[in-house]
Image: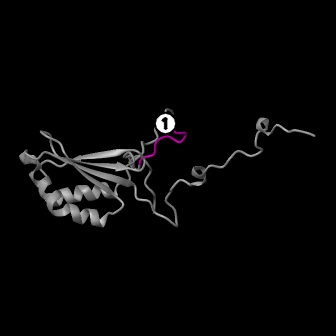
Amino acid sequence: MVFHNYSMTRPLVSPLMRAAQRSLPANGHAAFIPHIRKLVFEYCDKWPSSQRTRTFLLTQLQHLARENPHVEIAVRQRNHKEPIVRGFYANNRDKVIPLNGLEVTAIQQKVQLLLDSSGAKIKPLKRKAVESTTEAARGVWSGLHADRPVL
């Protein structure tokens, strides 16, 4: 009679966990994932600089939430501080826009700016001009110093 001790043997293949089968979400030709995850409106209930923000929240917030079901919207009181809106993005960044002194339509435009933004850092579109430390082999050409063509 032969006895085997199976408790000492290791499995040939490591177990495959269910969470390991999930793929990371990414934008592509078949799917679109919005960049913004959450909007947080912060305002003071007493300060006059938050009056237009309170008006926006009372009149436009439900419409905004219905148009953007993919965005979590939170409203927070921030006593004795200026009103702001903060956008949280999928790349773990956030953008903050102050709302003090803005009309309701301007607040709507700033919120739309956050909704359309990707959350990435702003990169300059212009690059620095290449400057050489040595003079060109042919020298510097100028139309003022060139000989006039003879016709």
Please give the name of the residue rendered at 7% of the width and 44% of the height, measured from the top-left corner: 47
From the viewer's perspective, is residue 70 above or below residue 143?
A: below
- What is the three-letter code of the residue carrying label 1? Ser
Specify the principal SS of the magenta part: loop
x, y (%) of residue 104?
14, 59
Indicate the position of residue 22 as horizontal and vertical percent values: 57, 54
Q: Nearer the viewer, residue 73 or 84?
A: 73
Viewer-side residue, 48 vs 103 = 48
Q: State the extent of the magenta-drawn residues as a range.
A: 135-142
Task: Determine whether, in the image, residue 84 is placed left or right of residue 16.
Answer: left
Q: Give the residue number, with chain letter if any, for mark 1.
A: 132
Determine the residue positioned at 28% across, 66% down. 66
Q: In the drawing, does residue 33 fall left or right of residue 83?
A: right
Residue 35's x, y, as percent? 40, 55
Of residues 138 and 114, the one drawn nearer to the viewer in this rendering: 114
Q: Quadrant of the C terminus?
A: bottom left
Residue located at (80% from left, 39% from top): 6
Which corner quadrant of the image does residue 1 belong to?
top right
Image coords of residue 49 (percent x, y) = 9, 47
- Which residue in the rendered view is the most extreme toward the front? 1
Density class for disc 1 (Cα within 10 Å; few <14, some 14-19, many ≥20) is: few
Q: Secondary structure at mark 1?
A: loop
